[in-house]
Image (tube, rainbow, N blue to C red):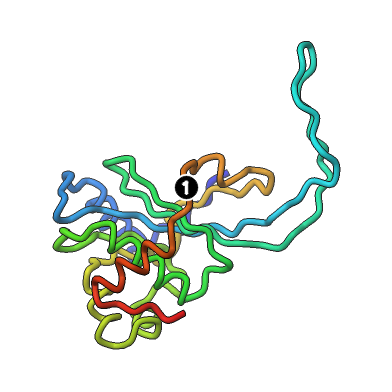
Amino acid sequence: MWCVAELDEEYIRRMEDILAVYEKPLNEREPVVCVDEKPVVLHQEIRPSQAMRPGQVARLDGEYQRCGTANVFCGVQPKVGRYFPKVTADRSSPEFADYLLEVAVRYPEADTIHLVLGNLSSHTRKAVVERFGQKAGSWLWDRFTVHAQTRQLAEPSRNRNQSVFATMPGPPSDRRSNLRCAKKLGLGAAE
């Protein structure tokens, strides 16, 4: 099920802005990156699954033990088919700021990065400045042209049994590598 918010003037203005961003031609100097986050419940199986055999489908018991939660940030460059997920403990402001640094490091030659964001309270310049300091944080935030939504344009219902990792294969980001890149850019991420 999809939920669409009330279609008032502000909603339509922001939707048209975002659609115009999506229509931009592919340009290495101005990439378009969409960022969102998803909470994930961590499960551990109670009983081991039984592998598929001739004449028998794989069997997976539905009982599980809850092992806490995590967050997945995902950036997508739609016209290139590029995506870069990052699993974090939560979706706090410092985690968001660190993720934006990783996005910026991926586009060192860009004049600006068009960033499409939801309306989460941590998606702010303040989060980046508090994490990296006034000078470096402002420099990092200014690398982006932010296209924020007042609310999600359309939000799919979430199936708690759907694995977010099945749709986002590939290695998790290498934090040490990103920190090395950050140091090259003069951004010392607070640990």
In the image, taking residue 40 as reference, residue 183 lies left or right, namely left
Q: Residue at x 77, y 17 (%)?
A: 53
How many residues crowd mark 1 within 10 Å: few (<14), some (14–19), many (20+)? few
Q: Quadrant of the N terminus?
A: top right
Question: What residue is drawn where x is 47% and y is 47%?
Answer: 171
Q: Is residue 137 above or below residue 172?
A: below
Farthest top residue?
Answer: 55
Residue in front for this viewpoint, 32 or 70? 70
Q: Which amino acid type corresponds to the residue marked 1 in the rendered image?
A: Pro
Is residue 82 or residue 189 the one in the foreground? 189
Q: Position of residue 82 (x, y in %)?
A: 34, 44
| x, y percent for residue 143 | 22, 69
Q: Position of residue 169 (x, y in %)?
A: 49, 41
Q: Nearer the viewer, residue 97 or 190?
A: 190
- In which quadrant of the rendered view does residue 26 lie? top left
Number of marks in picture:
1
Quarter of the view holding residue 125? bottom left
Q: Would you place residue 98 above or below residue 172 in this image?
A: below
| Horizontal side of residue 43 vs 12, given as left or right | right
Where residue 140 appears, x then y in whole percent? 26, 74
* Residue that extends furthest to the bottom in the rendered view of this protein: 134
* Residue sitting at x 46%, y 76%: 93
Q: Secondary structure at mark 1?
A: loop
Say which residue label 1 marks: 171
Relative horizontal placement of residue 180, taking residue 151 as reference (left or right): left
